[in-house]
Amino acid sequence: MSESSDPTTRETQAYLPDFCAAGTVFIVVLLAELIAIVLAVAVHDTRGQFLSDLWKISFFVLWYAVLGSALMCQLRERLESAGKTRAFVFSFLILLALCLVLAELAWQLTQRFDYLYLIADTHGGYVFRTFAIGSIVIALAMRYLYVASEWRRSIVLEAQARISALQALIRPHFLFNSMNTIAALTRSDPQQAEEAIEDLSDLMRANLGGAKDRTSLKQELEIAAIYQRIEKLRLGDRLHVRWDIAELPMRALIPSFTIQPLLENAIYHGIELLPDGGEILVTGKHEDGYLSIRMSNPVAPDAKRAKGGNNMAMSNIRQRFELAYGNRASVEIDSREDSYSILLRFPAEEMTE
């Protein structure tokens, strides 16, 4: 996926809400119906005409909400090319013009088909009342959608900053240990030293590359495998990693920079503190449209490091999963006296060309 086509990049550069998104359309329709109820209550008299007034107003505002969302969906990119202020001014004028067009159409239908009896007002009075109410409602709705869009945009930008921070969070001890291991290998096994340098170069390139919202599971596992090979040179037989992930589709999308930090924490807080090392088990399942990835490692009960780095990595991963999937994903931790495991569960969505 190119940067220009990345959903996160587009959203952080956007001013207007995404009227093509189902969630935005749902909110617009819901607000429209709430407004219809308020207007029906406002014009309700004692003749028991509330339901009649409600369906008349709902018929108008719901059509307007759907058509307005479709129009803004089509015009969003063009409007945003005019700049932030002009985009909102033009959007307001376009939506107000659509409101007046629909008002005029409703009036003409009432005049042509008397039995409809949709409007009990003069032509000028009805158009002016629609103009006044429409101006206020559109302005308030645009303001609400703008604030909601800016809130989400700030979360996306913060998450991107956290990804960048996580990418820069290669612990100094890992770099020092890796360079010392490579230096020792140059004398005993030059071929393996060259391969280690290439692996370290690939890992650094992945860490220093541009932050993306999501990447393929295949790429995530390749980065983790590179990190595992480098640590294996240092820890030797103390480190064993068993990958039981045959069920996972490699084209599935996952928030970027997820697996390698988990593997790093499992080694740093678990395997390194055990005199005889241990085995890290990574299992994956694909069932009911969801992917589950569990990483488990043994821990030394009486030798624990400070948890700051571990908590930071987990906080970043939680936030990015929540941003990408909302309440459809979960990050669960099972911390025991002699073991520690993390379970990631998220929707199975595959990347498109």
Image: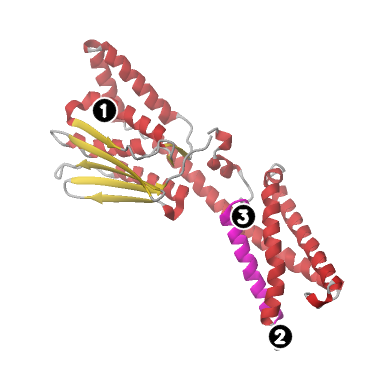
Cβ atoms under marks 1 and 2 closer than 8 Å: no
Report the residue marked by disc 1.
Answer: 231
Report the residue marked by disc 2.
Answer: 45
Which badge, 3 or 1, is on the more N-terminal residue?
A: 3
Measured as percent of width and height from the top left, residue 147 is found at 59, 56
Q: Nearer the viewer, mark 1 or mark 2?
A: 2
Q: Quadrant of residue 35?
A: bottom right
Q: Residue at x 65, y 74 (%)?
A: 38
Q: Estimate the spatial distance between the alpha carbons at disc 1 and disc 2, rounded to whole Å.
A: 78 Å
Q: Is residue 23 magenta?
A: yes
Q: Element under label 1?
A: helix
**Residue extent of the magenta highlight:** 19-45
Report the residue marked by disc 3.
Answer: 146
Q: Nearer the viewer, mark 3 or mark 1?
A: 1
Measured as percent of width and height from the top left, residue 226 is found at 33, 27
Q: Is residue 305 visible?
A: no
- Three-letter residue code for mark 1: Glu
Q: How many marks?
A: 3
Scheme of image coloration: secondary structure
Q: Element under label 2?
A: loop
Which badge, 2 or 3, is on the more N-terminal residue?
A: 2
- Three-letter residue code for mark 2: Asp
Cβ atoms under marks 3 and 1 closer than 8 Å: no
Q: Residues within 10 Å of mark 2 (few under 14, many from 20)?
A: few
Q: Is residue 111 left or right of residue 18?
A: right
Measured as percent of width and height from the top left, residue 293 is found at 33, 43
Q: Is residue 123 visible?
A: yes
Q: Nearer the viewer, mark 2 or mark 3?
A: 2
Q: Residues within 10 Å of mark 1 (few under 14, many from 20)?
A: some
